Image (tube, grey):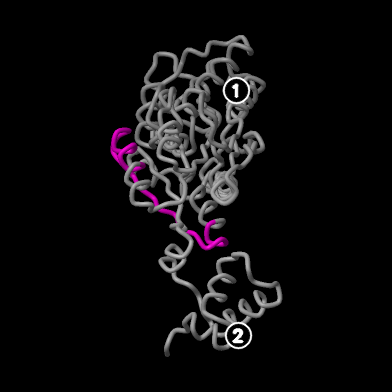
């Protein structure tokens, strides 16, 4: 069966091909009645414009980019990013756009990728994640004329930001463990060159200090489950192992629980564990994981919505999301006497 064309819509609606194009692209010069009739005809006969056709007529790519300088295996194993991307895709699909996703090996390759996207006009804007200290990307994207929305705020950036106070989740986790009677608490942290890794580590140290206990037991990792398992081994091998561990994400926490189980420890009697992000799997491991809830799909929806507003209107406000609060489950309890 032949696919309907714009000429079919024009013939059925008894208007010119140019008027159909104006109506479908929401351009001025078409009355409300005519626009409604054209859209009704297009829907009834099953006409849909190709992305390439729309791009040629509007000088837009109808795509947004997400470039990440991270190991794809680490990202694939972290439930945060599939949920975040699902939230982004939900908003883009409703507005007829697509996501261009790229993983690169270094920050230099990341900058080169942005330059290519801008030069080839492959995307209308980008989402910027994994902010770093003195991050050069916002300035680069401004120079390239590429609209951007950042996940978190970085000094010197004029781009709209989608922000969540993730320190609150770590602070609540430490307070919850201290209230249960723990005095020897360790933290398995993410990389401190990433702002959210450094923030969570600083929040752990500050919360311990406020509780009058040592915050020195910190092991830095790359956020991967494998490194989380290694960090747990290191902590449990100590002459006096901690009675509780606060992990910087759920994959590391679940890997750490596996190490504890393999050593014959009873959780949470012998070791209490908390995670971060409250991924779907957190409620279904044994014991169910106490974790800070960040709602990554909501992050994705908010980031995509802000970016589309920026692309279409030239400006967009910052978005402050609800702070990450602790969801208490069965992986935490008072330490064994």
Q: Is residue 180 shown left or right of residue 288?
A: right
- 120 and 269: which is toward the camera: 120
Q: Badges 1 and 2: C-beta atoms under 8 Å apart?
A: no
The image quadrant where one finds the C terminus is: top right
The image quadrant where one finds the N terminus is: bottom left
136 part of magenta stretch: no
Give the residue number, with chain letter if any, for mark 2: 13
Residue at 44% x, 54% y: name it.
99
- Which secondary structure, mark 2? helix
Note whether 102 is above or below 252 in the view shown: below
Which span of residues is magenta-colored?
92-114
- Which secondary structure, mark 1? helix
Q: Quadrant of residue 31?
A: bottom right
**Residue 174, disc:** 1
Note whether 56 is above or below 273 in the view shown: below
Q: Is residue 119 shown left or right of residue 130?
A: left
Residue at 29% x, 33% y: name it.
108
Residue at 60% x, 22% y: name it.
174
Counting from the top left corner in percent of width and height, residue 58 is at: 48, 61
Label located before the other in sequence (1 or 2): 2
């Amino acid at each position: 069966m032949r696919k309907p064309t714009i000429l079919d819509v024009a013939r059925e609606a008894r208007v010119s091909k140019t008027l159909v194009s104006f109506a479908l692209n929401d351009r001025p010069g078409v009355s409300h009645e005519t626009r409604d009739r054209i859209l009704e005809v297009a829907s009834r006969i099953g006409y849909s414009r190709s992305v390439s056709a729309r791009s040629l007529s509007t000088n837009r790519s109808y795509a947004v980019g997400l470039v990440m300088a991270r190991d794809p295996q680490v990202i694939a194993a972290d439930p945060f990013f599939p949920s975040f991307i699902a939230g982004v895709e939900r908003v883009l699909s409703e507005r007829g756009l697509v996501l261009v996703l790229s993983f690169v090996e270094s920050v230099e390759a990341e900058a080169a990728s942005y330059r290519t996207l801008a030069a080839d006009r492959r995307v209308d804007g980008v989402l910027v994640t994994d902010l770093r200290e003195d991050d050069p990307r916002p300035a680069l994207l401004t120079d390239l004329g590429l609209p951007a929305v950042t996940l978190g705020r970085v000094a010197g950036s004029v781009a709209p930001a989608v922000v969540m106070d993730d320190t609150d989740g770590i602070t609540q986790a430490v307070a919850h463990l201290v209230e249960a009677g723990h005095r020897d608490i360790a933290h398995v942290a993410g990389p401190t060159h990433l702002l959210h890794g450094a923030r969570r580590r600083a929040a752990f140290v500050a919360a311990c200090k406020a509780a009058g206990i040592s915050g020195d037991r910190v092991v830095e990792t790359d956020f991967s489950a494998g490194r989380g398992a290694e960090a747990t081994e290191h902590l449990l091998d100590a002459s006096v192992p901690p009675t509780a561990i606060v992990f910087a994400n759920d994959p590391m926490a679940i890997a750490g629980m596996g190490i504890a189980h393999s050593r014959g420890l009873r959780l949470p009697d012998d070791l209490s564990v908390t995670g971060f992000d409250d991924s779907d799997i957190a409620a279904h491991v044994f014991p169910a994981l106490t974790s800070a809830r960040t709602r990554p799909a909501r992050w994705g929806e908010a980031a995509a919505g802000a970016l589309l507003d920026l692309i279409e209107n030239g400006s967009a406000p910052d978005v402050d999301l609800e702070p990450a609060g602790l969801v208490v489950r069965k992986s935490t309890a008072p330490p064994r006497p």
